[in-house]
Amino acid sequence: MSATGETLLEIERLEVAYGGIQAVKGIDLAVQKGELVCLIGANGAGKTTTLKGICGLLPVKRGRIRYEGRDITGRPAFELVRGGLAMVPEGRGVFGALTIEENLAMGAYVRHDREGVRADIEHVFTLFPRLKERRRQTAGTMSGGEQQMLAMGRALMSKPRLLLLDEPSMGLAPLMVQKVFETVLQVSREGVTILLIEQNAKLALEVSHRGYVMESGEITLSGKAADLLHDPKVRAAYLGESA
């Protein structure tokens, strides 16, 4: 799905600090409805902290976060899920003692349309056939890649209008990374707006419409993903090529 020109998420001068560390230093960022936007940068750049600030998992020191035109700065995470904003956290965070089906049902806890929930579980199974094969297996016995699939499927069960993905490729085998990114593209095509946080700059820029580059808590570059992919500074810093 292409961007509509309507701003879905807008971040203005966002500052987030924790444990005495100023991790995010006054950044501006926007995501239009229908876009797939990536935020790339090295480990420790402040990417995950930015996401946690958006989701209400870390307190915002200064700045404003607007979603669908409403100020959501400091709103609790559960309230945002009800409003159509879902996050797949770094490390996946699946419920290890529950089955795949039970994890997916947990993702739909804000919904009351039983038939719709059942249909969406089947849709998740079409996105991730491997989950369907193991639907009654407990999540804690699955591989890291399968757990990442499940975490994404669970987030989709809340029918988000904006999906925040935090390092979906981390710790996965190359074939599993490819499958995860194929699914990210498919979800985007189905109309879900996505903000993707990712250390794998090449993959992130290849699937995104636009990108932001973060260094030491600040946005240092932004633009069309294709342009950033060929930017000498980006290639030297994140793609292992000489400038």
Image (tube, helix red, strand yellow):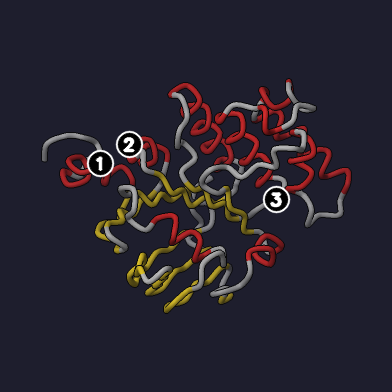
Q: Would residue 193 be found to the left or right of residue 123 on screen?
A: left
Q: Nearer the viewer, mark 1 or mark 3?
A: 1
The residue indicated by pointer 1 is 238
Which structural element holds mark 2? Answer: helix
Q: Quadrant of residue 11?
A: bottom left
Q: Quadrant of residue 120?
A: top right
Q: Depth check: give the residue in front, 45 or 40.
A: 45
**Relative to 101, residue 66 above or below:** below
The x, y position of residue 202, in whole percent, is 32, 36
Of marks 3 and 2, which one's residue comes earlier in the chain?
Answer: 3
The residue indicated by pointer 2 is 202
Q: Decide: few, some or many residues near mark 1? Use Cα within 10 Å; few <14, some 14-19, many ≥20.
A: some
Q: Residue, x 51% and y 61% (percent of image)?
A: 52
Residue found at the far left of this picture: 243
The x, y position of residue 174, in whole percent, is 43, 24
Which structural element holds mark 3? Answer: loop
Q: Depth check: give the residue in front, 80 or 70.
A: 80
Amino acid type at circle 1 is: Tyr
**Relative to 165, residue 11 above or below:** below
The residue indicated by pointer 3 is 159
Q: Residue, x 42% and y 38% (percent of image)?
A: 207
The x, y position of residue 136, in whole percent, is 80, 27
Q: Is residue 7 visible?
A: no
Of marks 1 and 3, which one's residue comes earlier in the chain?
Answer: 3
**Relative to 83, residue 102 above or below:** above
Amino acid type at circle 3 is: Lys
Q: Measure how far apart labels 1 and 3 are at the Cα level.
A: 33 Å
